[in-house]
Image (cartoon, helix red, strand yellow):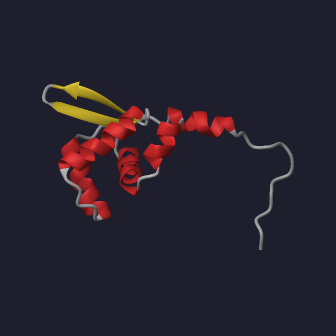
Amino acid sequence: MGDVFKALADPTRRALLDELQDRDGQTLFELCTRLVTKHGLGSSRQAVSQHLAVLEDAGLVTTRREGRYKFHSLDTSPLQVITGRWPPRPGPPREDPP
């Protein structure tokens, strides 16, 4: 579970997850392009590849190869494990402070 928190701690990795949520099955080139155009993040392909490796190690990204291309997909199951660890308490809903 520590790997998931480490992976989510970086804003570039969170942006990558956002992009995979918007459009699953993207290549490294597509993700780099979207990071620049939508988020203004000018990371090198090598840096983005390293971020994707951290996300893959945490189980948040899966990959599949087709010929020369590697497609990245979002996997939210590690997040479900985290939220399942602290389920909501029964009872009346808590009110937000004024």
Q: Residue furthest bottom?
A: 98
Q: Position of residue 91 (x, y in %)?
A: 86, 46
Residue pictured at 36% horizontal, 44% vertical: 20
From the image, which quarter does the N terminus lie in? top right
Front residue of 97/11: it is 11
Q: Is residue 15 above or below residue 77?
A: below
Residue pictured at 32% horizontal, 41% vertical: 52
Q: Residue furthest right?
A: 91
Left or right of 77 in this view: 45:
left
Number of numbered discs visible in the structure rendering: 0
Front residue of 67/49: it is 49
From the image, which quarter does the C terminus lie in? bottom right
Residue pictured at 51% horizontal, 32% vertical: 77
Q: In this view, does 29 lie above or below 70?
A: below
Q: Position of residue 69 (x, y in %)?
A: 17, 32
Q: Where is residue 82 in the image (x, y as percent from the top left)?
A: 60, 38
Residue pictured at 35% horizontal, 49% vertical: 16
Front residue of 54/76: it is 54
Q: Where is residue 76 in the image (x, y as percent from the top left)?
A: 49, 37
Left or right of 53 in this view: 79:
right
Left or right of 26 in this view: 69:
left
Quarter where residue 41 is shown: bottom left
